[in-house]
Amino acid sequence: MIEIRDLYKTYGSGGAEVHALAGVDLDVAAGEVLMLMGPSGSGKTTLLSVMGCILRATSGSVKIEGREVARMAENKLPEVRLKHFGFIFQGFNLFPALTARENVELALKLKGLKGTRAKAEAAALLEQVGLADKLNAFPSDLSGGQKQRVAIARALAGEPPIVLADEPTAALDSQSGLTVMEILTGLARKRGRAVVVVTHDNRVLQYADRIVRIADGRVVDEEDRERAA
Ligand SMILES: Nc1ncnc2c1ncn2[C@@H]1O[C@H](COP(=O)(O)OP(=O)(O)O)[C@@H](O)[C@H]1O
Ligand SMILES: [Mg+2]
């Protein structure tokens, strides 16, 4: 699904350069839950952003389902993002003035689904994350765990083959964090999605197929884990 080779990402220039990624090699397979761990500032968010075509690489190769995106023209990247990725962030990033269903519908519209079909699909996605009874709730009426589940439903709009999550459980209590991980893991197991999760959260490591540790912009350790049933 994802093939990264000798990836570098440098922010700034001249004396103020920050080498956020310094020679990363990484593969992510379909159906796999990969966790990225490492200290703050080690380059995890940068790696996720370059993977997800939110940021351009400085050098190196990034192949998404066989297609080289590292040197693709800037104006082609939004299309790649929409086609291949769903994103989930720590802070949920929901629109406060829109209901749960409208937040998901908006993402579906971006992916070309409109009108009553978008409405029905939004309801189906929210049902899939256990929020069938919260379609018309506003984010302010939802708990942190519920908001993150809306964010997951939104990330699943258009059935992206790859789901990227940046510290999705950091703002959640233990039980909500586990529920969120159950849902994300289910996507990989039952639907063959590639799921990449940046986390500091030791409680969720049990869900990983593979744990990759990053320090100073480099992969320092990879650990394969027994796949849970
Ligand atoms: N937009 C930016 N401009 C300059 N430096 C940045 C920017 N974003 C991140 N960095 C720097 O790049 C390094 C890696 O950051 P980041 O990928 O956010 O790490 P992590 O997610 O592991 O905490 C850090 O030194 C950070 O300060
Ligand atoms: Mg980060």
Image (cartoon, grey):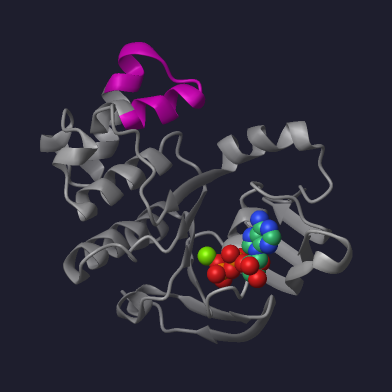
Q: Position of residue 77 (x, y in %)?
A: 70, 38
Say whether residue 147 is left or right of residue 111. left
Residue 106 part of the magenta segment: yes
Q: Nearer the viewer, residue 78 or 124?
A: 78
Overall secondary structure of the magenta section: helix
The outermost residue toward the front is: 15
Q: Position of residue 161 (x, y in %)?
A: 52, 47
Q: Quadrant of the C terminus?
A: bottom left
The outermost residue toward the right is: 14
What residue appears at the point 25 percent right and 63 percent down from the top-left corner?
Answer: 172
Say whether residue 197 is left or right of residue 66. left
Residue 25 part of the magenta segment: no
Q: Is residue 114 above or below residue 52?
A: above
Q: Nearer the viewer, residue 207 or 88?
A: 88
Say whether residue 70 is left or right of residue 112. right
What residue appears at the point 45 percent right and 75 percent down from the top-left corner?
Answer: 209
| Figure quadrant of residue 7 | bottom right
* Ligand 1 quadrant in view: bottom right
Q: Nearer the viewer, residue 176 or 216?
A: 216
Q: Quadrant of the N terminus?
A: bottom right
Q: Is residue 201 above or below residue 220?
A: above
Question: In the image, which residues are magenta?
Answer: 103-119
Q: Is residue 124 above or below residue 12?
A: above
Q: Is residue 66 above or below residue 80?
A: below
Q: Position of residue 227 (x, y in %)?
A: 40, 78
What residue appears at the point 39 percent right and 43 percent down from the top-left corner?
Answer: 93
| Figure quadrant of residue 190 | bottom left
Q: How many marks?
A: 0
Say whether residue 25 is left or right of residue 99. right
Q: Position of residue 79 (x, y in %)?
A: 65, 32
Q: Nearer the viewer, residue 60 or 97?
A: 97
